[in-house]
Image: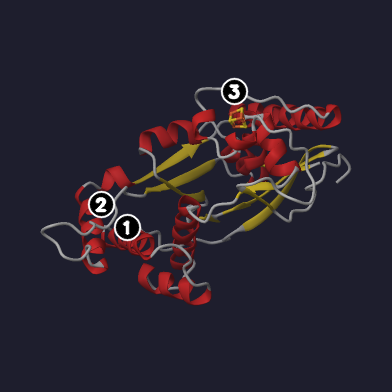
Amino acid sequence: MIVSHSQLDKFRVCHWVYYVKYVLGLEPDREDDTARRLGTFAHDVYQAVGSGAAPDVHAAALALIDASPWIGEEHEFVSILAVLEARQQLGLIRPEIKDIEKQFMLRLAPEIMVTGYTDGTLPTGDLIEFKTTGQDLGQYFRFALKSLQLPIYALATGRLTITLDVTRRPALRPKSECKTRKAGEPMAEFGDRVKAVVMAEPDKYFQSRRVQLLACDIERARAEVIQTANEIWRCNEAGVWPRSASWATCPRCAYEGLCEVNYSGGEFAPPGYKLEEREGRHGISKNQ
Ligand code: SF4
């Protein structure tokens, strides 16, 4: 079977989510997937500037929306652009990155292959991964370091030092119409306000940590990946995918609506979800 680190991590959080998302291929049907949209956009801008494809974040952002028009709300774009410009003004944009989006296929056992893409390599030889979050950065790092992503990348590339470069999105929206203000906040003013907030407390919005993995971390991750992949296989064979039912995960779960529903697949998605066209959607093959 072929798995990615996000599939393994999702399975570890809740087996039922893995089943619904990766076996049945259901995604929440919502246009407001702002977090993912903004994260991908920031990630692509960093890569464009780092690879030399664009001279600065502004040019990179314009080229990206030229190639694929922004489908979110205008204020989202204004806000993320202000964050990226603030970062550039603070001198925190990495100017040299190589091996952008390099794919790997890592065989960990005769029937288990792990696949993924590394974001890039710094001139020091470290791998670099760009992340965007709405969370407090201390909390973000606490959980990110428990993910299997970094040790898997280290195993696949032989590089034990990985820089995790995280940008936090500020939770700001344009001021709306009120008694003293006839119209809502103009977008240019909103962008300036976002930039000022971010630049006033850069540590709150931009942090990067150089994670040094040890041989014991790698060996533990190897064992965990094999064990997790085997558990996925056993759930698939038995047709039983236990729910996690945890106060820590359920309140924020995008699949909560399917938790109590007896949906077992088909050509039509239940209300509120859509079917993703994805290879392997209707099952897992151990011989892939
Ligand atoms: S609501 Fe909880 S138990 Fe249900 S799918 Fe989500 S994480 Fe799993």
Give the side of residue 129 with respect to residue 219, left or right: left
Pointer 2 with pointer 1, Cβ within 8 A: yes
Q: Secondary structure at mark 3?
A: loop
Q: Name the residue that disc number 1 marks.
A: 83
Is 64 on the left or on the right of 218, as rendered?
Answer: left
Coloring applied to the structure: secondary structure
Lateral position of residue 155 relative to residue 238, left or right: left
Q: Based on the displayed image, in which of its 4 quarters is residue 18 positioned?
A: top right
Mark 3 residue CB less than 8 A from any atom of ligand 1: yes
* Disc 2 within 8 angstroms of ligand 1 (CB): no
Residue labelled with disc 2: 198
User: Number of numbered discs present?
Assistant: 3
Q: Is residue 40 above or below residue 245?
A: below
- Mark 1 residue element: helix
Answer few, some or many: residues within 10 Å of disc 2's Cα (few below 14, many 20 plus, some between 14 and 19).
many
Residue designated by label 3: 245
The N terminus is located in which quarter?
Answer: top right
Residue type at the position of mark 1: Val
Cβ–Cβ under 8 Å for marks 3 and 2: no
Q: Nearer the viewer, residue 104 or 36?
A: 36
- Check the image and name the residue furthest to the left: 180
